Image (cartoon, rainbow, N blue to C red):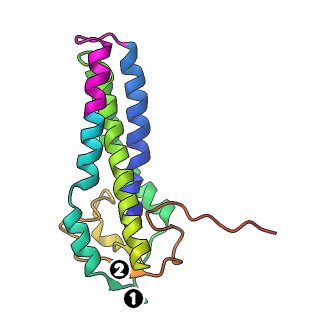
């Protein structure tokens, strides 16, 4: 489940950084200094809001997590990430273009807002990872409950989470890629 949350963090972060870099090159209506300061404020607000929104729903679903059954399909980390990015590619492109376009009014602010959303998703995934480590169980969402864009791990269609041991799957708690042991 943290993999789904974390899947959008990297694209949002990097598209935001690139858009902010392009935005700094444009003088804009407000000037670079005001644009960067406004962007920094938007970055902090966006990271905070994205990291803390719907925490109650996540806690409620995690508290009622059932043990994964024999016939539950647990999707690979790479497949989940790819499905999320394919399902949201047009929204990512639209967000990037809006961030670059906003640079003509307020330089770098739109890009830093986008990057703040990515940072907030990383913070939320880290929070979920701490909960998973404390409970010693990875939390999973049934694939058919994720929906078309493979997103919304706490959406209306999600009735509950499945739990497995922390050694299951190819993801660590928090959705990071599991580090394999070095061959000797």
Task: Please state which of residues 88 and 63 is positioned toward the viewer in this rendering.
Answer: 63
Q: Does residue 20 lie above or below 113 as drawn? A: above
Q: Is residue 140 among what the camera can see?
A: yes
Task: Find residue 75 and report its horizontal and vertical position in percent.
Answer: 45, 70
Tell me whether the residue at label 1 lies in contact with that at label 2, contact meaning CB atoms closer than 8 angstroms.
yes
Task: Find residue 59 and report its horizontal and vertical position in percent.
Answer: 25, 71
Which mark sits nearer the N-terminus, 1 or 2? 1
Q: Residue at x 30, y 44 (%)?
A: 47
Mark 1 or mark 2, which is nearer to you?
2
Q: Quadrant of the N terminus?
A: bottom left
Q: Residue at x 26, y 22 (%)?
A: 102
Q: Does residue 106 lie above or below 53 as drawn? A: above
The residue at which mark 1 appears reads as 69
Q: Is residue 94 among what the camera can see?
A: no
Classify mark 2: helix, strand or loop: strand
Task: Please state which of residues 74 and 58 is positioned toward the viewer in this rendering.
Answer: 58
Distance, label 1 to label 2, CA atoms, is 8 Å
Q: Which mark is residue 162?
A: 2
């Amino acid at each position: 489940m943290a993999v789904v949350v974390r899947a959008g963090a990297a694209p949002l972060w990097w598209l935001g950084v690139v858009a902010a870099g392009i935005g700094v090159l444009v003088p804009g209506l407000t000037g670079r200094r005001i644009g960067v300061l406004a962007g920094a404020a938007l970055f902090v607000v966006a990271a905070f809001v994205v990291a803390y929104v719907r925490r109650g729903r996540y806690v409620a679903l995690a508290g009622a997590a059932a043990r994964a059954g024999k016939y539950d399909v647990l999707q690979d980390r790479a497949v989940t990430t790819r499905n999320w990015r394919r399902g949201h590619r047009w929204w990512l492109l639209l967000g990037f273009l809006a961030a670059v376009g906003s640079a003509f009014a307020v330089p770098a602010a739109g890009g830093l807002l986008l990057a703040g959303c990515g940072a907030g998703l990383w913070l939320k995934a880290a929070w979920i990872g701490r909960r998973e480590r404390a409970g010693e169980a990875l939390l999973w969402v049934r694939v058919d409950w994720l929906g078309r864009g493979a997103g919304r791990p706490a959406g209306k269609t999600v009735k509950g989470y499945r739990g497995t041991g922390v050694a299951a799957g190819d993801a660590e708690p928090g959705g990071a890629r599991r580090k394999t042991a070095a061959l000797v």
